[in-house]
Amino acid sequence: MNVLAKVSNEKTMSSLEICNLTNKRHNNVLADILGLSVFYSSIYSAEKSAQLVTSSSYRDLSGKNNKCYLLSKDAALDLITGYSLPHRHAVNQRWLEIESAQPQFTVPANFAEALRLSADLQESLDEANHKIGQDAPKVEFAMAVRSMQGACAVSDFAKSIGFGRNTLFKMMRDDGLLMKNNMPYQNRVDQGIFKVIEQIPFTDSKGRTHPAFTTFVTGKGQVYLENKYRREAA
């Protein structure tokens, strides 16, 4: 794959490297990493998750920017646990190279080089600040979810009482707990059964932005729904 990848001063491995080492399609590797990132978000703080998996980009030879990820060693090894032995070996060997590499820094030889270095550093700082601004809604969403002690996603709760996600959604719609769009009625929120958290707005194929929400079952709601549905499932 002919790409011009961004260079990071941290010891990370890009999704492109993993793609090349394992002979996998990059979009498949991205999907695997996204699943890993979601898992990390469920067990770690947003700051810790960002240290393990960082969203980035690279520019291909046509000049187009494309999405990629930068992984810490722990994240890379977690990712490839399900890959074949030759693939795990290739990634492990690459990590040995990364860890043995010495950081390279060249002292500017003249005023022009010093100006270029200053400009490069400022560009990196601008990119970092831009990324912080882009990631702010994601961090806010993660913080809002973690602040709901005992709450869980409907899909996770459905598994715990022996139902599929779609089946439980249908049952709750039929019983007047949720609306057709799977959002709870306001009186159910007022009763403390559900909470709704706003997610990052999504943009459709026509460039229009739409709000997005996720329904969570509160601790009180889990007791209520388990008493209601687990008996019916028995």
Image: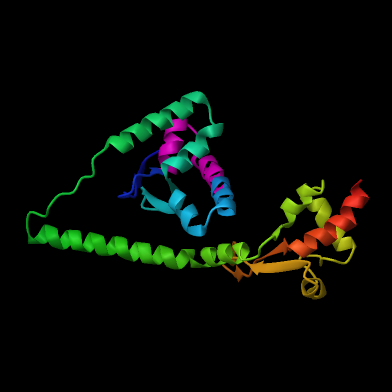
Residue visible at 35% across and 62% down? Answer: 127
In the rendered image, residue 22 lying in the magenta stretch gets the answer yes
In the image, taking residue 50 as reference, residue 206 lies left or right, namely right
Q: Residue at x 56, y 65 (%)?
A: 143
Residue 123: which quarter of the image? bottom left
Res. 224 in view: yes
Q: Position of residue 54 (x, y in %)?
A: 44, 52
Q: Considering the image in quadrants, where does the C terminus appear?
A: top right
Magenta stretch: give its range.
Answer: 14-34
> What residue do we see at 11% from left, 55% from top?
108
Q: Residue drawn 82% across and 54% down?
A: 168
Give residue 202's position: percent from left, percent from top.
59, 64
Judge by depth and name the residue closer to the eye, 66 or 35.
35
Coloring applied to the structure: rainbow
Residue 71: image quadrant is: top left
Which one is nearer the viewer's eye here, 224 or 129? 224
From the viewer's perspective, is 185 left or right of 90?
Answer: right
Image coordinates of residue 131 in percent, x first then y, are 42, 63
Q: Is residue 186 above or below residue 10?
A: below
